[in-house]
Image: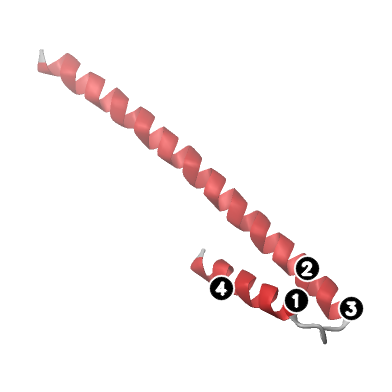
């Protein structure tokens, strides 16, 4: 993910220059959008994983209490 962040920053810097040709600008924008989409998917997947881990921890605690009695 860090590599994507670095590449996104590099693309933004290059897009900020006024001497970037139109076709290069278009390909940079496509790559930028792809990387941002990937980053968003990874973030969303991580959110689902954390939710699943929390649920499993609660289930494990319940089982431990059940067998501890």
Name the mark on residue 15.
1
- Residue ID at (45%, 41%): 49
Indicate which disc, 4 or 3, sits on the residue closer to the N terminus: 4
Residue sitting farthest toward the right: 22
Question: On the image, which quarter does residue 20 sit in?
Answer: bottom right
Mark 2 — residue?
Answer: 29
Q: Are marks 1 and 3 in contact (CB under 8 Å)?
A: no
How many C-alpha atoms fall within 10 Å of the one at disc 3: few (<14), some, or many (≥20)? few
How many C-alpha atoms fall within 10 Å of the one at disc 2: few (<14), some, or many (≥20)? some
Indicate which disc, 2 or 1, sits on the residue closer to the N terminus: 1
Residue sitting farthest toward the left: 69
- 14 relative to 6 in the view: left or right: right
Image coordinates for residue 18, horizontal then vertical, percent? 81, 83
Dot 2: what SS? helix
Mark 1–mark 3 Cα distance, whole angstroms, equals: 10 Å
How many C-alpha atoms fall within 10 Å of the one at disc 1: few (<14), some, or many (≥20)? some
Mark 3 — residue?
Answer: 22
Indicate which disc, 4 or 2, sits on the residue closer to the N terminus: 4
Q: Are marks 4 and 3 in contact (CB under 8 Å)?
A: no
Mark 1–mark 4 Cα distance, whole angstroms, equals: 14 Å
């Amino acid at each position: 993910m860090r590599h994507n962040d670095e590449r996104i920053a590099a693309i933004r810097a290059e897009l900020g220059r006024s001497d970037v040709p139109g076709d290069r600008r278009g390909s940079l924008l496509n790559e930028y959008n792809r990387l941002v989409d990937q980053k968003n998917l990874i973030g969303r997947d991580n959110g689902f994983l954390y939710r699943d881990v929390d649920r499993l921890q609660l289930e494990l605690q319940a089982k431990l209490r059940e067998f501890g009695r």
